[in-house]
Image (cartoon, helix red, strand yellow):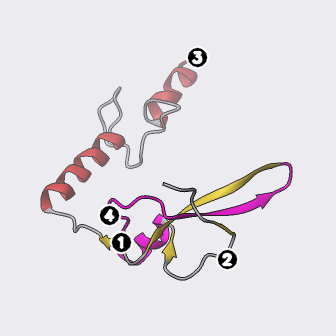
Amino acid sequence: MGALPVFRWHLAPDGYATARQLRAHGLRPGGQGVAAQLERPRRRRAPLIAYLYRVDRAKPVRPMTPAKWAALEKANTARRTCPRCRQDAGYVIPTSLGMCVPCADAPALAA
């Protein structure tokens, strides 16, 4: 396999899209490899790279099944549940704290 074609930022030909652009159109790469790349030059640093996929080889996004929706809801509930007080915090628990804000502030308030 040869080297990938490299295009300058905003100068990619029609028929190529990034993964985010594919997703915005209801598509996914579908197992195809990277077809090309974009390079955005930066001063005194390495260029930003964006990988491109062929739009004609992209496949439709798979629909969410009831089982996938249930698994997603269970995962999000676990991210919102404080391990200390076991309450639903109503927001995703920050990993930097490891617990809800009231539980993290409790030792400071007690002192």
Q: Position of residue 27 (x, y in %)?
A: 35, 72
Task: State which mark lies toward you, 2 or 3.
Answer: 2
Write down the region rendered in magenta. 19-44
What residue is pinned by disc 2?
11
Give whichever of 16, 21 is nearer the camera: 16
Give the secondary structure at mark 2.
loop
Q: Residue furthest right?
A: 44
Q: Mark 1 and mark 2: span between their CA atoms?
A: 21 Å
Q: Mark 4 and mark 2: span between their CA atoms?
A: 24 Å
60 on left or right of 94: left
Q: Is residue 28 magenta?
A: yes
* Callout 1 amino acid: Ala
What residue is pinned by disc 4?
30
106 on left or right of 87: right
Q: Mark 2 and mark 3: span between their CA atoms?
A: 60 Å
Q: Position of residue 73 (x, y in %)?
A: 24, 52
What residue is pinned by disc 3?
111
Q: Are marks 1 and 4 in contact (CB under 8 Å)?
A: yes
Q: Residue at x 54, y 83 (%)?
A: 14
Q: Residue furthest top?
A: 111
